[in-house]
Image (cartoon, rainbow, N blue to C red):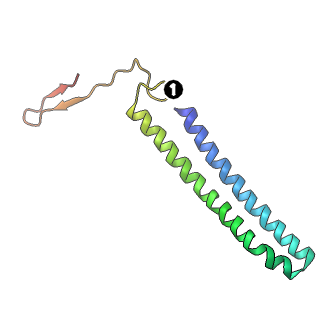
Amino acid sequence: MDPILALLDSLGSLITTVAIAGFIVLNLGFIALVALRRDRAIVNRWTKPLVVADTVLLLVAGGAPAASWALRTSVRAVAIAMPDLPGIGAPSDTKVTVEVSDPMEGRAYPLP
């Protein structure tokens, strides 16, 4: 289970880092283009696509950690629900016992 969780964690971090780097590079490139050309037509033509690209990159940067967390939580839930699943759950030779206590007499009865 640990390698899967580590992979999901690193993948979420990598996607966030790439999205933030893309956001910075895209905006610095646009600022440089406008500063070099000093043409109002470039600003009018490329502002809407730039805003859309910025929105997508920011949503990816914010959504990747959330998706990674949801996937890691799901993997943990599967590991708890299916302890004999190879590679995820506890080893199959581990015996799990559950006891139910009788509230009237205070004794515990092991379940089969």
* Residue 44 horizontal/vertical position (percent): 80, 79
Which residue is at the front of the view, 89 or 55?
55
Rendered residue at 19%/31% (across/down): 100
Total number of numbered discs in the rendering? 1
Query: As shown in the figure, which amino acid type bears the numbered disc 1?
Result: Gly
* Residue 26 horizontal/vertical position (percent): 78, 64
Rendered residue at 51%/26% (across/down): 87
For residue 36, which quarter of the picture?
A: bottom right
Mark 1 highlights which residue?
87
Q: Give the vertical position of 49 relative to 96 (above or below).
A: below
Q: Give the vertical position of 23 relative to 79 (above or below).
A: below
Q: Left of 102 or right of it: where is 60?
A: right
Q: Left of 79 or right of it: where is 18?
A: right
Which residue is at the front of the view, 54 or 6?
54
Label 1: element kind? loop
For residue 5, which quarter of the picture?
A: top right
Q: Left of 69 or right of it: where is 27?
A: right
Rendered residue at 78%/67% (across/down): 27
Q: Give the vertical position of 48 relative to 79 (above or below).
A: below
Which residue is at the front of the view, 31 or 105?
31
Rendered residue at 7%/36% (across/down): 104
Give the quadrant of the C terminus: top left
* Residue 50 horizontal/vertical position (percent): 74, 69
Which residue appears farthest toward the right when viewing the image? 36
Which residue appears farthest toward the bottom when viewing the image? 40
* Residue 32 horizontal/vertical position (percent): 87, 70
Q: Left of 19 or right of it: where is 109?
A: left
